[in-house]
Image (cartoon, rainbow, N blue to C red):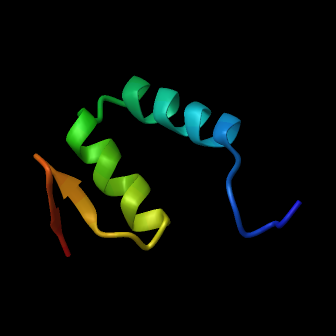
Amino acid sequence: MDNETMNIKEVDRLIDWLTAKGMSPQEINECICYIAESPVITEGREEL
């Protein structure tokens, strides 16, 4: 497997860990989008 990608299990564990650390769903979304180098999706629209 490519060492530069995350599998779904790793993403799921990251979400659980961030939630346990007190991050909101919006903060978690922003974090994952930042890691993936993707635009942040908020309320049906993209933000850079």
Residue nearest the viewer, comparing 29 with 22:
29
The image quarter containing residue 40 is bottom left
Seen in the picture, residue 40 relative to 10 is either above or below; the reply is below
Would residue 25 be found to the left or right of residue 42 on screen?
right
Residue 13 percent location from the top left of the image: 60, 32
Residue 14 percent location from the top left of the image: 54, 39
Looking at the figure, which quarter contains the N terminus? bottom right
Seen in the picture, residue 10 relative to 31 is either above or below; the reply is above
Residue 47 percent location from the top left of the image: 15, 69
Residue nearest the viewer, comparing 47 with 25:
47
Seen in the picture, residue 26 relative to 13 is either above or below; the reply is below
User: How many labels were placed on the picture?
Assistant: 0
Residue nearest the viewer, comparing 21 with 19:
19
Residue in view at x 81 percent, y 66 percent: 3
Residue nearest the viewer, comparing 24 with 9:
9
Seen in the picture, residue 14 relative to 4 is either above or below; the reply is above
Residue in view at x 26 percent, y 34 percent: 25
The image quarter containing residue 31 is bottom left
Looking at the figure, which quarter contains the C terminus? bottom left
Residue 29 percent location from the top left of the image: 32, 47
Residue in view at x 42 percent, y 54 percent: 32
Residue in view at x 65 percent, y 40 percent: 8
Would residue 38 be found to the left or right of residue 26 on screen?
right
Residue extending farthest right: 1
